Image: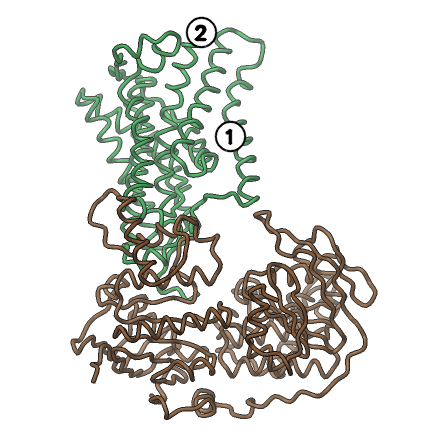
Amino acid sequence: MSSCILKIENITKSFAGFIANKNVNLEIFEGEIHTILGENGAGKSTLMNILTGLYRPDSGNIYINGTRVNIKSPKDALNYKIGMVHQHFMLVNNISVFENLLLSMKLDSFVINERKLKSKVKEILREFELDIDIEMPVWKLSIGQQQWVELIKLLIRDSKILILDEPTAVLTPQESEFLFTFLTKLKSQNKAIIFISHKMKEVMTLSDKVTILKKGETVKTLNRGEFDEQLLAELMISNKEHLKLEKSAKVFSKQILKIKNLNVKNDKGLSDLSDFSLELFEGEILGIAGITGNGQKALAEVLTGLKKPLSGQIIVNDQDITYSTSKSKYISGIAHIPEDRKTMGIAPDLSVDENLILKNYSSDKFTNFFFLNKEKIKQNAREQIEKYSIKMGYDGIPVRLLSGGNIQKVIIARELSENPLILVALYPTRGLDVGSAEYVHQVILDSREKGMSTILISEDLDELLKISDRIAVMFRGKNMGYLSPESATKTEIGLLMSGKK
Amino acid sequence: MISIIIDATIRAGTSILYATLGEIIIERSGIINLGIEGLMLIGALSGFYTTYTTGSLFLGVISAVLIAGIAGLIHGILCTYFKGNQIVSGLALTMFGIGITAVLGKKMVGQTIEGFKRIEIPFLSKIPVIGNSIFNQDILVYLSIVLVFVITFVLYKTVWGLNLRTVGENPYAADVAGINVTAYKLWATFIGSGLAGLGGAYLSLAYTPLWIENMSAGRGWIAVALVIFASWSCKRALFGAYFFGGISAIQLRLQAMGTTISAHILQMLPYIFTIVVLIIATIKLEKGYSSQPESLGLVYDREDRK
């Protein structure tokens, strides 16, 4: 019988009147992989940030190996051997991997003894059979490699409790497999692993135990064998209706968008898109699979006019709009759900009302001459809030204080308000809980019925397979080919994602 | 002639060099300090006053560093504990420095002290043309050059330097690595401000051993600009500072030779070059060749919900 290494008792934490954690209880044992499951805003990240010393709880106790501890700062957490791979990596981009790793090592001398430490780092890499060039600056690594650096940091510190916050969000299926094998190996070394994920399949394969959080409270802890996908989903989300998605069969004939040999370079002079071609039919949902950083962002930016291509053509309804501005692209019917909803999707300090008209504030609908018409803006907001059931604390609340799912709803409401022809959705469900993600899918499917086409760029293969009509795979700025979601397997897609045909 | 210009270049560049090194250290911690100009004046006056009353140049230097360091620490505290706006706080510090030194320095105007003497380094100073201009300077000039290498070493080869750079790049990463972010920011601000004060003291104790109201004459601003030009590297700051020193030296020489160009235009030269340099550096930044600390100018709040 392994011992309880970490016990959380009645933890409560609130932010400015909003309760993020309420009497949370949790027990973690050595040598187990314990999944924390919950919708966004269920309080998973808050709880983990309390464990790592970033937040101080309002009340409650934490015990490590049976002794009550007070984690006042990240430093304390490190002393208690708690380590975490954060969703936003805690890496310094401009310095080398080696220097990043140094931050996690106990250095007793003032002057850094490079040669000695480098061989020590290499030794650790060899021990865990990892292949990373430690001289590279971190920003040159792929997201997947950066995550490994984060993980290595924990190994160097010899953390006993490892927290991984949605680690597979940035990995290919094959890379995820490798990570899972690795985690299993760590488990056999008696480490406790706290795993946070939304992806049911991996939760099923990996977890020894699952604890479900809902609205900041612990619902239940289940042992392996006691849970299945259906049960977990039901426990986690309040609303069961959303679980089934209906999709009508359709035949696509009319080509609405054609991209021909598009070339785009980024700030650093590297190719983001090289001879990229794509076709999209009316009413179709075209899924685009690929590991983050293979040109997806550039594709969305070029389509929505945020970036100018070097060469190539974008044709919508026989009209060449390659070099149109973002405003005229919006007017010609291309809507955009951006990748980073908080920095690109909204004006964070403005209200929901104002955010809903960011793209058409100057239209006659909302103006009297050149003054904004507050009445009509309010009216519009009321309709949209009702239609998309956007939940907000109070009227006029800055939109940044909404939960991720509700912010996404505001963006979708705005983007779909002018009935666009094409929706370019870049990771629209990233970081959303199952309920909100289902909602986004539902909206996209509803718009499909009305004839809108969607380019759905995602890293979640389950999502792509579930709602796409066709799937294209991107690798190093190229379109690797189309697959049909009915016949394609994940392995097939995974291979294309890593450039193998 | 060349020898005289090199000599004048180094002497004119040294105070800017100190200030630039100071600002580099502060900005490496993620704090922008626009108070450099004010800190230089505070350093210049406190150095002069102390030397005037005690007769010791050494004590003058020490008091310049300490008093400017403490004044800068006010900015540091505002930017960390009180999460203030760094631009506003820095500008206030400059205005405070200009004002308070004008008031408190009234009695020192017109007083004289014995400034730093040149120290001739044997043999090296005998090198033709450059020898006497480079190796026959006062101790503060030598110290500034030594500091360039010391600070570079500390920043890149020591644990303290690595931690400081991490704090300036990504304070969240520093925090979860167990580094005391606030302490590093405060130490960097203290040391950097002290160096700016030393730059000021160089003016009043060595360059022209006098106290003149507003004697830094915009050198603090040039230093702030030079940090960007030098892309936060001490060695490049050395070249930058001497470049500006050179321009002031040449314009003074031209004036002395009685050219027909208006003296006002000549005096503008260093500032015009500041603008040119900033434009070039900004274009470089825009193109993404930036080595600017990523979190420069941002407030760090551990519990900030992203």
Secondary structure at badge 1 equals helix
Q: Position of residue B91 (x, y in %)?
A: 42, 41
Three-letter code, disc 2? Met
- Residue at 52% in and 84% down: A435
| Left or right side of B257 for A255 | right
Residue B111 drawn above or below residue A392: above
Res. A387 mark: none
Q: Amino acid at mark 1?
A: Thr
Chain letter matching colour brown:
A
User: Looking at the picture, how far across and down is residue A125, in whole percent?
Assistant: 34, 58
Label 2 – label 1 distance at C-alpha: 26 Å
The quadrant in which residue A329 appears is bottom right
Rendered colour, chain B:
green
Name the chain under label 2: B
Q: Is residue A148 left or right of residue A385?
A: left
Q: Residues within 10 Å of mark 2 (few under 14, many from 20)?
A: few
Pointer 2 residue: B1
Specify whether disc 2 shares its chain with disc 1: yes
Residue A179 location, quadrant:
bottom left
